[in-house]
């Protein structure tokens, strides 16, 4: 099993949910986060960054973080779909981080690993 940590623009959440549903993944966890990539959150040279009403030099932009644990065999299909549907062609389109998941347990039934997803 692999965990995909998918960080995207908030407006792309519905697209990502559809991609994950289509891949028959059981569940997902979504959180609202702040982040920056290579551009350090600068969208417009010289722009003043304001977060929750405060000016800041820490240039963070609102992003959505999707965590989904999937069978190894689903990973490439999901990444192909994400590459197809998510890019706008502008900086800040996001990233996918992939890590190994050793095991999983569904607490209700005791099912393990892929059966627990
Ligand atoms: N190296 C990293 N580690 C953790 N999170 C990252 C990293 N790079 C990007 N992110 C997350 O992904 C979001 C989108 O990054 P993005 O601007 O598309 O990356 P880049 O500018 O490097 O191409 C960031 O706002 C941040 O939340
Ligand atoms: Mg960037």
Image: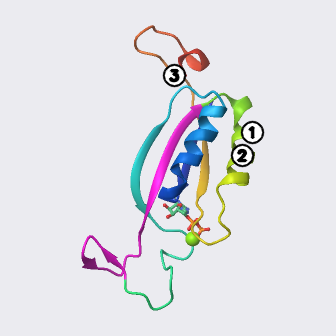
Mark 1 and mark 3 lie on one chain; the one further toward the N terminus is 1
Instruction: Give the secondary structure at mark 2.
Output: helix
Q: Which residues are magenta?
A: 49-69
Q: Count neighbours of disc 3 (C-alpha within 10 A) and say few if under 14, some if 14 to 19, many if 20 or more.
A: some
Q: Does residue 59 show up magenta in the picture?
A: yes
- Measured Cα–Cα span from mark 3 to mark 2: 25 Å
Q: Does residue 75 appear to the left or right of 42 in the view shown? A: right
Instruction: Name the foreground residue: 106 vs 48.
Output: 48
Q: Count neighbours of disc 2 (C-alpha within 10 A) and say few if under 14, some if 14 to 19, many if 20 or more.
A: some
Q: How is the image coloured?
A: rainbow
Instruction: Give the secondary structure at mark 1.
Output: helix
Mark 3 and mark 2 lie on one chain; the one further toward the N terminus is 2
Q: Residue 56's x, y, as percent?
A: 31, 80
At x 53%, y 46%, the residue is: 14
Q: Nearer the viewer, mark 1 or mark 3?
A: 1
Q: Which mark is residue 77?
A: 1
- Which quarter of the rendered image does ligand 1 occupy? bottom right
Looking at the rendered image, the quarter that the N terminus falls into is: top right
Residue holding disc 2 = 81
At x 51%, y 41%, the residue is: 67
Would you say the residues marked 2 and 1 are in contact, meaning their CB atoms lie under 8 Å apart? Answer: yes
Q: Residue 68's x, y, as percent?
A: 54, 36
Q: Residue 61's x, y, as percent?
A: 43, 68
Looking at the rendered image, the quarter that the C terminus falls into is: top right
Residue holding disc 3 = 104
Q: Is residue 95 visible?
A: yes
Q: Is residue 2 visible?
A: no
- Measured Cα–Cα span from mark 1 to mark 3: 22 Å
Q: Does residue 12 appear to the left or right of 73 in the view shown? A: left
């Amino acid at each position: 099993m692999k965990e995909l940590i998918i960080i995207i623009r908030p407006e792309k959440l519905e697209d990502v949910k559809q991609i994950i549903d289509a891949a028959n993944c059981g569940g997902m966890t979504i959180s609202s986060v702040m982040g920056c990539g290579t551009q350090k959150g600068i969208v417009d040279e010289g722009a003043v960054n304001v977060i929750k009403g405060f000016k800041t030099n820490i240039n963070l932009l609102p992003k959505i973080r999707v965590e989904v644990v999937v069978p190894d065999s689903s990973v490439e299909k999901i990444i192909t779909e994400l590459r197809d549907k998510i890019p706008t062609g502008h900086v800040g389109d996001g990233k996918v981080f992939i890590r190994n998941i050793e095991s999983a347990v569904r607490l209700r039934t005791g099912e393990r690993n892929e059966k627990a997803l």
